[in-house]
Image (spheres, rainbow, N blue to C red):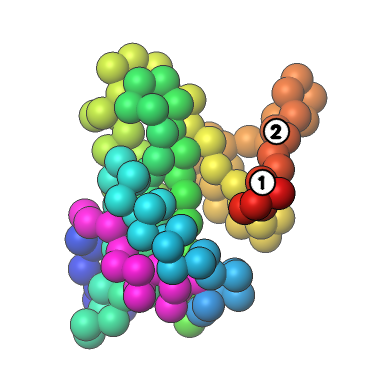
């Protein structure tokens, strides 16, 4: 399979299409625009003019970085696209971080073995990640 990796953020349309392709609920359009504009870095994988994968880095540019919205179209999974994209995102973080960097991400249970190859581990023994969603107007 031939594809090109391009270091850029996905467009809002690409972002939505990839979310839908992997079964995620897309962001509201105004949320997508703000999220993409405030990203530190992005990568897209393109094959025959179609974006088949994406990922972006968010964070404080110092100590904390997060891999966000990392997705590969299901028909292209298991073919090295995700591996190539993740390696490029981690290379960006290594170059951008002034020292040791904390790199986090959220993963589905099925994706945990993939991320473990890069040193990501669930850490429920010492710390537990917590999160919430704050809804507009409430």
On the image, the x and y values in percent for residue 115 come to: 55, 47
Res. 43 image quadrant: bottom left
On the image, the x and y values in percent for residue 53 come to: 38, 68
Question: Which segment did they paint magenta?
Answer: 7-19
On the image, the x and y values in percent for residue 86 come to: 39, 50
- Does 127 appear above or below 21? above
| Label 1 to label 2: alpha-carbon separation | 17 Å
Q: Is residue 53 in view from this perspective?
A: no
In the image, what residue occupies the spot 69% across and 39% down? 131
In the image, what residue occupies the spot 24% across and 29% down? 95
Res. 93 image quadrant: top left
On the image, the x and y values in percent for residue 49 come to: 22, 82
In the image, what residue occupies the spot 22% across and 84% down? 48
Q: Secondary structure at mark 1?
A: loop
Q: On the rendered structure, is 74 left or right of 80?
A: right
Q: On the rendered structure, is 17 left or right of 96?
A: right
Q: Is residue 18 magenta?
A: yes
Category of crowding for the residue at label 2, using alpha-carbon neighbours closer than 10 angstroms: few (below 14), some (14–19), many (at least 20): few
- Does 68 appear above or below 63? below
* Total count of labels: 2
Q: Secondary structure at mark 2?
A: loop
In the image, what residue occupies the spot 47% across and 49% down? 68
Res. 82 image quadrant: bottom left
- Residue that numbered label 1 is attached to: 134
- Residue that numbered label 2 is attached to: 129
Q: Is residue 34 in view from this perspective?
A: yes
Image quadrant holding the N terminus, namely: bottom left
Q: On the rendered structure, is 2 left or right of 136?
A: left
- Does 116 appear above or below 85? above
């Amino acid at each position: 399979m031939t594809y090109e990796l391009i270091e850029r953020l996905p467009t809002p349309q690409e972002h939505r299409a990839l979310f839908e392709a992997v079964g995620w609920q897309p962001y509201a359009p105004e949320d997508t625009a703000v999220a993409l504009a405030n990203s530190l870095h992005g990568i897209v994988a393109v094959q025959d003019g179609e974006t088949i994968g994406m990922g972006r880095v968010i964070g404080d540019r110092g100590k904390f970085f997060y891999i966000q919205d990392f997705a590969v179209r299901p028909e292209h999974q298991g073919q090295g696209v995700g591996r190539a994209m993740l390696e490029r995102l981690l290379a960006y973080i290594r170059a951008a971080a002034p020292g040791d960097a904390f790199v986090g991400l959220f993963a589905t249970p099925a994706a945990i073995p993939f991320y473990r190859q890069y040193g990501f581990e669930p850490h429920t023994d010492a710390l537990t990640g917590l999160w919430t969603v704050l809804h507009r107007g409430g």
